[in-house]
Amino acid sequence: MDLTARPNPRVTPDNRPFWESCREHVLKLPWCADCDRAFLPPAPVCPSCFGERIDWRAASGRGTVSTFVVVHQPWFPAFADDIPYNAAQVELEEGPRLTSSLVEVANEEIAVGLEVEAVFDDVDDENTLPRFRPRRRG
Amino acid sequence: MDFNPVDRAAIAGIGASRFGRHLPESQLALGAAAFRAALDDAGLERSDVDGLAVNLGWPLGLDYDRIAEAFGLDIRYVNQTWTHGRFVTMALQQAALAVAAGLAEVVACVAVASFTRERDILGGPGDFEGMREEGGTHAENPPYGLTAPAAGAALAYRRYMSLYGATTDALGEVAVTLRSHARRNANAVMRRPMTLTDHRASREVVAPLRLFDCCIVSDGAVVVLVTSAERARDLRKPPVFISGMQGIRAGRDEFIFAPPGLGINQQRPGRVTPRPEDGDAWRMADIERDDIDGLYTYDAFTPLVLFVLERFGFCAPGEAHAFVGGGRIALGGALPVNTSGGLMSEAHVSGWNSIAEIVRQLRGEAGERQMEDARHLQWATMWGDSIVFRR
């Protein structure tokens, strides 16, 4: 195991549709077909009604920053050159919160409540990470 | 027949190894030193111990099987949890329930932490738990470089600052207060004076948290011996009774480092604390919040102290950042917190160092830290579990 490599998402049977749609530059969320609610993290059952009919639907990609941090500690060798870098939780319009990072904004400009939209970062041939940038007006 | 655990079990002995950083002793050597000290404190023999409770096993500490094998014990009851500080309460509760139910006569809660040797698991590529399916338990998310428990506390405090206008100086008040307690504790690892200015000048780790918002990474061991109330009364030291308890909370409104309602991960936002169920331990002990003379908590990061105060209703949501100043959580204040210095300044023995301090305080053995006339002390964590102790 290469401990200097950039960690990739851990694809599981439950989250595979999420990461596969990211490859297509589409943000999808699991919806419960019974109670019609989106939820995260992905799971084989709805946390509201325990229903098993999960429907993956395209999300708007819009949300607001609900919280964020700026990492200064060089925990990961692969991120050493990025320090200080941000990570954020984004509350999506559909309700669930997604952990991600923010681009096209200086760390000093990030604030809770910042309106953002998803962009897609093809980090390698197999992995695409959704990130978020400040939403453009008009 | 109703099973009533109130005051059925008691702490009869406490013992500790030395605490320090980069100690040369093995985990077994640290554990043995604490075990020996606890037996001596209680006036019990090694052969009296027939139960083990462990919340911090491999790789940070000792697992039950090696403890029993190496120390030559004959064990008939074991409880060992997932290796996390959050299970201190559960280990102690299970010990109390086991002796109350007759599953064991004397349960040794054995906590060994060799954090300095194993620090790579605390964040970064060595933190394999961060790659747990659907993310780490403190919101770690390695593809985004989000790692280490500190990041979870930082996510929570950033949102708290935004909602309530809190500043990082409130965290400094916590760090400075706990350091002032450690300065009255000869066994504490960190005894250098700390001021708010020092806190402001410490390096950023994961903003908004600075180095002095993070507990020390240290090595040490604590053993706590739990037995029945009847037996404890016949032993060397006055019993410290376990009078009320409540378990760890979990669900979509829970995030390990944010009180319900803050809005981290999938928590529903709202000013919901304190909730009736967060007072279960007081009701079991037949006391009220105002009867608590001191609060002991898992202070791995300074925001957790603010959050536990709000979760348990010592402060309303958004008020703890103002409450922690003015000496209110210091010895002699309205609600002293972690009077031996806690994880922040005494040592990180997963909180068992604070359990031992509760026992010392209720026995009147706390020396220059001794609180006046403390009757009820509470161990409570911001993830909602608790034990009420009385003398």
Image (spheres, rainbow, N blue to C red):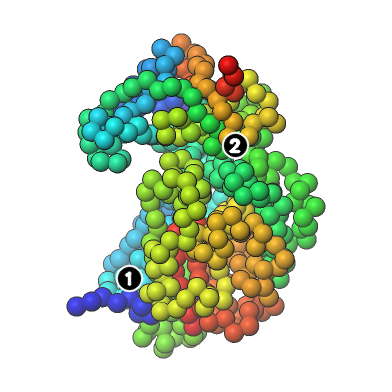
- Identified by mark 1, the residue type is Leu
Mark 1: few, some, or many residues within 10 Å (few <14, many ≥20)? many
What residue lies at 58% left-to-right and 43% top-to-bottom?
A: B159
Q: Secondary structure at mark 2?
A: loop
The residue at which mark 2 appears reads as A112
State the image coordinates of residue B143 (x, y, percent, origin top left).
50, 27
Which residue was labeled with disc 1? B97
Which quarter of the figure is the N terminus of chain B placed in?
bottom left
Does residue A66 appear to the left or right of B181 in the view shown?
A: left
User: Which secondary structure, mark 1?
Assistant: helix
Marks 2 and 1 in Cβ contact (< 8 Å): no
| Quarter where residue B98 is shown | bottom left
Is residue B109 visible to the viewer in this orientation of the structure?
Answer: no
Q: Chain of mark 1?
A: B
Task: Decide which of A87, A47 is in the foreground and name it.
Answer: A47
Residue found 68% across the figure and 45% down from its top: B210
Q: Position of residue B36 (x, y in %)?
A: 50, 71
* Distance from the alpha carbon under mark 2 to that under mark 1: 44 Å
Q: Position of residue B161 (x, y in %)?
A: 63, 46
Residue at the farthest bottom position: B234
Give residue B296's position: percent from left, percent from top: 55, 66
